[in-house]
Image (spheres, rainbow, N blue to C red):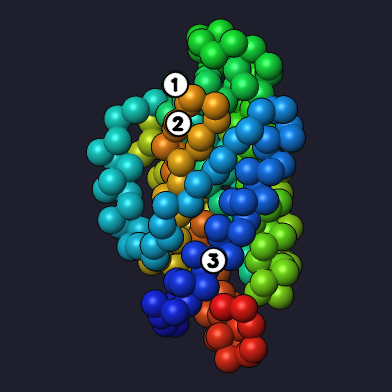
Amino acid sequence: MQISKEHLRILDIVVKMGMDNASRTFSKTIKHAALIELVKTELMDISEITEEMNNDFREMVAAMLSLEGTLNGKLLFMVSLDSALILQDFYMGEPQGTSKEFDEFTEGTIQEIGNILASAIGNSFASDLGSALLPTPPQVVCDFAGVIFSSLIFEDGVDNDKILLTETIFKIHDAEMNCYFFLLPELNSLEKSLNKLESSDSMF
């Protein structure tokens, strides 16, 4: 298995398209201009990311779901609790600062964002890589970053030693929130799809 720099460039474009689609969908949902901005896409060692997560001592809210189809995998979207409460206020149409603690409405907000992101990414992979990805219903968890990452990423066992990390920023009105967004695709199948796309005539 070999994911090249050219593969990562293609993935960066595909994921960016997915984020753009997710931004439009989320903007319509909250009736407010929202931008989910992709900063970079990296393929990193799981051990390295695990250490980074264990050193992040913030309380986080995360949506985790499986992607099934041509490329099986997992998706994890995670934001700090403070950011999740801001997103909840926008989602519920409340003034910023209204939500004070994690509850079923916070869970519902992060679950919906997980659905939006998974559908947008799945559609991008389908249209650009020809890989069908169908998301399962998200599981929402509120805990520390290291606990969430370890329990959700490794709960079913992971054969890969690499994970695709996309650094993203949520921008809504005057609020800007950093978030973690991880894709854990089955890398051998992903490599085949990327090789096929790279050798064909395409916009990439």
Left or right: 27 in relation to 77: right
Q: Quadrant of the C terminus?
A: bottom right
* Residue 83 falls left or right of residue 30: left
Q: Residues within 10 Å of mark 1 (few under 14, many from 20)?
A: some
| Amino acid beneath label 3 | Ile
Q: Assign a secondary structure to mark 1.
A: helix
Q: Residue at x 43, y 60 (%)?
A: 41
Compared with residue 64, is residue 159 higher up or lower down, i.e. above or below? below
Mark 2 lies on a secondary structure that is: strand
* Residue that lies at the very extreme toward the bottom in this rendered image: 199
Q: Residue at x 30, y 30 (%)?
A: 57
What is the number of the mark on residue 82? 1
Question: How many numbered circles are shown?
Answer: 3
- Foreground of the two, 52 or 36: 36
Q: Secondary structure at mark 3?
A: helix
Does residue 66 show up? Answer: no
Q: Position of residue 189 (x, y in %)?
A: 58, 77
Question: Which mark, residue 176?
Answer: 2
Residue drawn at (27%, 48%) of the image: 51
Return the x and y of residue 102 as percentages of the image width and height. Answer: 54, 17
Mark 2: amino acid = Glu
Q: Which residue is mark 3?
A: 13
Q: Earlier in the sequence, mark 1 or mark 2?
A: 1
State the CA–CA distance, disc 1 to disc 2: 12 Å
